[in-house]
Image (cartoon, rainbow, N blue to C red):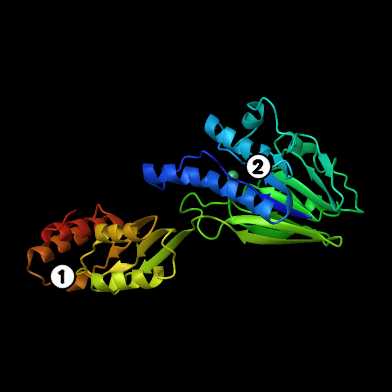
Amino acid sequence: MKIIHTADLHFDSKLETNLDALKAKDRKKELLATFERMVEYAKANGVSTIIIAGDMFDKSRISTKTKEFVLNCIALNPSIDFLYVSGNHDEDIFIESIETLPKNLYIFDERWKTINYKECDITGINYNDSSEKYLYDTLFLNKEKINIVIMHGPLGSRGSGINVNNLKGKGISYLALGHIHKFQKGSIDNDGYFVYPGCPEGRGFDEIGPKGFVLINIENNKLDSEFIPFAKRELHEVVIDITGIDSWIDVRKNVSLKTNSIPDKDMVKVRLIGNYDINLVKQIELLNEYLNEHYFFAKVVDESKIAINAKDYENDISLKGEFIRNVLQSNDLTPDEKNEIIEYGIKALMKEEI
Ligand SMILES: [Mn+2]
């Protein structure tokens, strides 16, 4: 028996914080297309059940179009069971808005419910403030069988978060979780482990790295699982330290070297750090344009600071020297403010755009 474990799809979520409006629109469609592609994968690979461990939507932002798309994906594939627990973002809005549920969509609620398959039992609950009070004491599994348990929430202890310690010895083989957007796996006890599959597509630069789902395989009374990278586009962060680099050509070479292996279809954030030489003329906008021509989306974040050695300007009689001495001697400015003012001042003196 093959099972897909996914979570945190966050359909219709706002993507504008990281992307421009057009790209955000494209990405919204891609989140749905990836879900459809995953269902196709399930069909092609003999997957009989898809577990969605919460956060299918972003709370109140559910368009009719998206709802219909998801319901169609489910209803058009009656050979696959879709098991769904709600997450902290979607709560029950999605379910309440459906007039007739597809027969192959199974919704869990605030009490433990078990679906019995030949190869395993799958048990789930909607984890929230009230169910958290009794869920550990009310979970009873058939230890003769392989048990998959579904919940959505963060890990934690002492009354907030899913407490893995309280799940020890319950007979869980695989705890299918949702909430953390990055793939994560850890032990419960000798019988089993928990897994967060992460989101199927990264939505911003806080969701970098490979994204996909987990494929569970049960054979000869034994459960195995494997992370399957499946995202259409991956997000990358590349950090370039420009300390000591005195020409922009060399900065560009460094960027090229470090972005070399990133596929064009992906998204890249280049973060410049370090203390750069006062003579280095930064070409941030050009770098940004160059990267955006190569990748689906790119952005440059400049966190570098100008390197100022006060001694170098002690005897400098030029306007630049006078200006730097003045700023450095000021008592009302923090070191960071001094640095920023000098950076702008130098640019102005060199007649650069500020
Ligand atoms: Mn989530």
List x then y, in percent, for residue 149.
78, 48
- Give the residue furthest to the top: 99
Task: Decide if ligand 1 comes within 8 Å of the CB at mark 2.
Answer: yes
- Residue placed under numbered mark 1 in the picture: 313
Residue visible at 90% across and 49% down? Answer: 142
Are the two marked residues, 1 and 2, in contact with CB atoms closer than 8 angstroms?
no
- What distance separates the C-alpha of mark 1 from that of mark 2? 60 Å
- Amino acid type, label 2: Gly
Q: Is residue 129 above or below residue 253?
A: above
- Amino acid type, label 1: Tyr
Q: Earlier in the sequence, mark 1 or mark 2?
A: 2
Q: Nearer the viewer, mark 1 or mark 2?
A: 2
Q: Quadrant of residue 314?
A: bottom left
Q: Quadrant of residue 302?
A: bottom left
Picture disc at residue 54? 2
What is the secondary structure assignment of the residue under circle 2? Answer: loop
List x then y, in percent, for residue 105.
72, 37
List x then y, in percent, for residue 182.
59, 55
Residue visible at 44% across and 61% down? Answer: 237
Residue 19 seen in the current view: yes
